[in-house]
Amino acid sequence: MRGFRDRIAALTATVLLLVLMAVPFLWASRLDAQSGVKQIPVPPPPMGWSSWNSFSNTVNSQIILDEAKAMIDSGMAKAGYQYVNIDEGWWLGERDAQGNIVVPDKSWPALAAGEHAGDMGNIVRAIHALGLKAGIYTDAGMDGCSMYPDLGPAYQHTGSEGHYEQDFLQFAQWGFDYVKVDWCGGDKEKLDPAVQYAEIERAIEKAEVATGRRLYYSLCEWGKNNPWTWAPNVGGAPADIWRTSGDIVAPIVPHQKFSGRLASFPGVLSNFDQGVHPEAQHTGFYNDPDMMVVGMPGLTDAQNRVHMGLWAISGAPLLAGADLTTMSGATRATLTNADVLAVDQDTLGLQGVKAASDGEGLEVWSKALATAGERAVLLLNRTGDPAAITARWSDLGLDPNGSATVKDIWTGKELGSFPSGYSATVQPNDAMMVIVRGSEGRLNTYKPSGGTEVSKGHEVSFAQVSARVPMARVRITYSNPDKTPRYAELRVNGQIATRIAFPPTGSGNSLGAVWVEALVDRSGATNDLHFAAICDSGPTIESIAVE
Ligand code: GLA
């Protein structure tokens, strides 16, 4: 009798143990939080201002100083904007006998005692003295873009080809923190952007080692050569952004008021649409739909808010392009709204995706945020009539049976708690943007089919994976004991691979998690995910969890 009871007790314990072991694989997100796997914050997209949209080739020291000061006085710096970026037009293609860039004295005078004109270090010191960071611009080819007549004459040879190491070292020595590299010259010469931009990143790294300064890397080949397939981590960049479309405004045409600087709402929507490549946007790498035109001539205040909302839901770089010295109160409020900025800068680092469509032109965009159960949601009405649009919790990957609260980003009002979704009537060519706080939906956890270490010659593979939606969020639980990121590339179902950064997780085997979005597009449990090494040692990958 006793033996029978013991056997029952042992059986019950075994069943209990098996159930307990299975639970994490069913409700992984919540239990992972309990089991202490840290979500590793990734570098956010850059925030700042760039000279191009408002000043084109007329940029000079005074303009930059005024804009930098306006960034402080307007409260933008306090809200998180930090880069003051000098775009094309700052030099005229002249080099000295040693090949050093000759900076025009008149445009870039001395600003403090002991300085001399024609030294870009002057403006950098002034920007740094305001507590801001400074950005500079060049081209990967021989010529820059200002070959076409813009304001003033067309200058040749404003690119860095043939001088990569020299120029990027010079930028770092001047003290710059950010460099945008255009593609006009490269395009004209039919160079291979993946090769050139990797070469430039290596020059940047050398300059960083030589000076101890970090140069943030911004690639600008307008999406012509599908940069989202090769730009993440190009040349080993720890974080970078790449343009996904042409310019949001055309350059100034002389003697015509606002000509070329006129922003348009269709232009904003078009750049937004071309920037959607969620599979490439993760762990500090970002699609860049161009500098913003919020507050520029041609857009209403409501359209400015839609534009800002679209960039934030996309997790896009937020580089204001309006003249900050003359912007209206409404523009300032749009650019500095804390909730919209928090959506953009969220430490999960993912891009918003179209979660549902309520008919032609009625779209629900959703961005998963770092707090479990939180989504930023944009209800976008592209049609000419007011229309109801509904965000359903099931479409957002939230627990469909739980209720969620909704907060309007632009009014700041809590709208209440709703059982299965939220509906609003949205005006024509307008959007409503809200934060939804509910319960995280189900994730399925998978263990690798072989070993867990990504290294040369050894991939970590996951087979028979299924997903709720084709573009699915994937949480990767890994360890990296180093002090710097390790990298690996992820290939899903034989598609083009994407390079993922795995930031340090702490010493020993301590685990962390980063998120990606992947096209897990085969139906049923038939998808394959493979992590392969880029250099000798990659991360150790314990498991993945897929929505
Ligand atoms: C290209 C870029 C713009 C700007 C101009 C400068 O058109 O896309 O963002 O840098 O060049 O000429």
Image: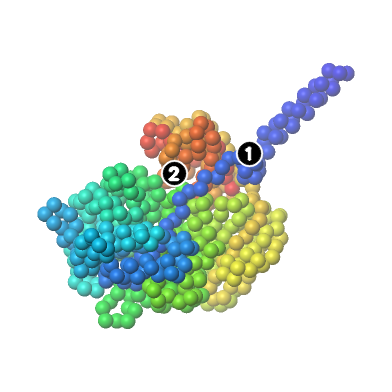
Vertical position of residue 202 compared to residue 129: above or below: above
Q: Nearer the viewer, residue 493 or 206?
A: 206
Q: Along the polypeptide, which appears first: circle 1 or circle 2?
A: 1
Q: Secondary structure at mark 1?
A: helix
Residue that appears at 38% across and 38% down: 534
Residue identifier under label 1: 35
Residue that appears at 58% across and 38% down: 446
> Residue flagged by tag 2: what amino acid is it?
Ala
The reply to whether residue 46 is visible in this rendering is yes
Please tell me in which quarter of the rendered image ligand 1 is found. Answer: bottom left
Camera-nearest label, 1 or 2: 1
Residue 75: x %, y % from top left: 47, 67
> Residue flagged by tag 1: what amino acid is it?
Ser
Quote the CA–CA distance across marks 1 and 2. Answer: 23 Å
Disc 1 crowd, CA 10 A, few/some/many (<14, 14-19, 20+): few
Residue that appears at 65% across and 45% down: 30
Vertical position of residue 502 compared to residue 153: above or below: above
Residue 196: x %, y % from top left: 27, 50
Residue 409: x %, y % from top left: 58, 66
Vertical position of residue 269 compared to residue 204: above or below: below
> Which residue is outermost to the front?
113
Residue identifier under label 2: 501
